[in-house]
Image: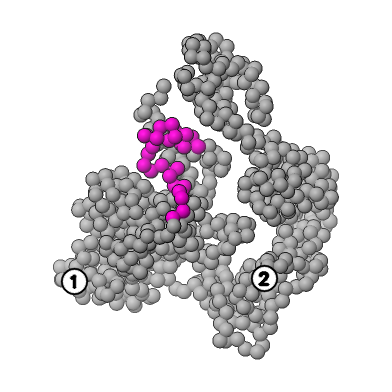
Amino acid sequence: MNTHAQIVSQMRLLITTLKRHNHAYYVLDNPTITDGEYDSLRQALVKLETDFPQLKQADSPTDAIGGEPLPFFTQITHDVPMLSLGNVFDKDDMANFIRRVNDRLDDKNKNPQFEMELKLDGLAVSLKYRHGVFAQAVTRGDGQVGEDITHNVRTIRNLPLVLPDCMHIELMEVRGEVLMPKAGFLRLNKEQQMRGEKTFANPRNAAAGSLRQLDSNVAATRPLAFYGYSVNQGLPNDITTQSGAMSFLQSQGFEVSPFKVVVDLGEIDEFYRATIDERDELPFEIDGMVVKVNSLQLQNDLGFLSREPRWATAYKFPATTATTRLLDVEWQVGRTGQLTPVGKLDPVNVGGVTVSNVTLHNFGEIGRLGLMIGDVVSVHRAGDVIPKVSGVMMQLRDETVRPISLPTVCPVCSSPVVLPEGEALARCMGGLVCQAQAQEALKHFVSRKAMDIDGLGSQWLIKFFEMGLIKTVADIYRLADKTEILQNLEGLGEKSVANMLLAIEKSKATSLPRFIFALGIRGVGESTALNLAKHFGQFDKLQTSSVDELLKVPDIGEITAQNIHEFFNAQHNINIINDLINLGVHWQAVVKDTNAAVLDGQTWVVTGTLSLMGRDEAKAHLQGLGAKVSGSVSAKTTALLAGEKAGSKLDKAHSLGVKVVLEDEFLALLAEHGRQI
Ligand code: IVH
């Protein structure tokens, strides 16, 4: 029997594990477990919380999923106004700032320490914690009055909801920045694009858009993070510096930006330059640094001038926007035939990087910008986010400009180009006849998340394609018949060919989700492939599915369902799939998702010795089918799985009238629900 203390410790373990995985997924963009594994951990916690609501932990991440949408945002007046910072752009201005600070300080306080932080490019928010428990989050608004966004901020994965050492502090106000890390931003935009929804111009806009939602379910899916930078009320008295406040925030579980105590202009400039060098490697965007007088007492003495503190300033980075001329537009053909316009620019330096090509995304974007060839454009590059044209200088347009027209035929294969009514994406209709599409499809097929043939790099793949050794993806598995030709190619010897063929051979053993993803069906990314595999369990069921059936799969809408259906009904695809299977590509059966919940709500107990598996394995199967497995039989037990030499538990089950399941019956249950033993 589990004591309450044991339940709490199970809950704590699950909470820390989930938080670690949340951080890996949302902040580092480097998940270490699958979504399925994550869900089962989360489910385990939900189950404990449902069974023992009185033991639920205040910082449980299961709360992080939003509740009912709010009807409107409530306006909240800040206890202390949220002001802004003055700016300096170079070392001379910085020297002037230091001089102004010194001019106002008494002799004994002159040449104070400064504390430097990164200037995070997100949105300022004020958080309130009552007795150490997160209570409220408010936007900056106009500095005096902001909006209550508690429901959204509560969903932020790295936000501590309980501060371990602040239970005795009636009210604490923490300020900081909500931002979207770069990796998460790129992933979100990709997902938005796949779903046909609007993409965001930069991480800051994406963070703002996420916080501006009345429905916290939206924010809950967004990769937001909070970084603290000040404690404006309730800071423990023994903390007397800004650097101390930052360390305190860290000790309470807050993420803070890297910070440093510096003593003069030389040190300030050194940290500033070092940060510029590292800027692209940071997980989030910054637009400069903030230099603050370190002593909180001196900050107080220096005070504010109108709406800016005299004790701090922003040391901004050089601009990341530049202007240049658009010389031409070329069209690139992607894997599924989409035509992407690429702007050829008069090369220009943008924040230290020379930019001569810039993606214009799609034909719709050209219309939105009103762009013409010969226009002077502003090019923006933020961190390592790819450069983009952010605007057209209409006032500089002259009569030499010419319109950008969508090609009527594909620049690669001359097949017709189609732009569906109301859509922004034009496509080449050549399918695999189009060399560009065929090559991209091959590259996709061998890529890491698809068949993962890392021994066959794209350069060789394209070379083999150009030589006619490979026409379709199935031909990759026929390369073994062409060993001699391969060995005689310059740059490929006996050994490298053997390695390549071994990698190809190894890739034949794959998984169903990978295989589905590798086929490169339009709209079927990695997660959709996984959903399809889970839903259908077997490939032939997917192949013969109707559009209606496809629509039942999570995240699949009309267009993707149609695409999938058409893909599996096109004869050339059927041939390639048959070839792949005949050439030995195979995968393990997938347990159908619908089975996961067959024992949902049931409590099982396992006892005695099973002949075909250990008790732990039996337990895992039962949990996999949705059952809870308990250690002791009670009136609430649904069934007792009894192996050989079952003892007192079997007697108890009999006396309580609990159903007893023997091994044969159990194996039949597993087989029925597709579980492999
Ligand atoms: S301290 C009195 N520290 O910059 C204002 N602000 O221009 C004290 N910001 O609205 C602000 N990173 O959103 C501070 N490390 C940092 C910051 C930071 C970003 C933003 C903040 C504020 C704006 C002021």
> In the image, residue 275 lies at what x, y percent?
42, 64
Specify the segment rendered in magenta. 43-70
Q: Is 148 in front, or is 641?
A: 148
- Mark 1: which amino acid? Leu
User: Which residue corresponds to the image point at 69% horizontal and 35% vertical from the top-left?
Assistant: 589
Name the disc covering residue 105, or none: 1
Write down the residue under mark 2: 363
> In the image, residue 448 lies at what x, y percent?
65, 49
Q: Is residue 263 visible?
A: no
User: Which residue corresponds to the image point at 80% horizontal and 67% vertical from the top-left?
Assistant: 416
Residue 531 included in the magenta stretch of the image: no
From the viewer's perspective, tell me whether residue 439 is left or right of residue 210.
Answer: right
From this viewpoint, which residue is outermost toward the bottom?
399
User: Which residue corresponds to the image point at 69% horizontal and 40% vertical from the top-left?
Assistant: 536
669 lies above or below 301: above
> In the image, residue 507 lies at what x, y percent?
71, 42
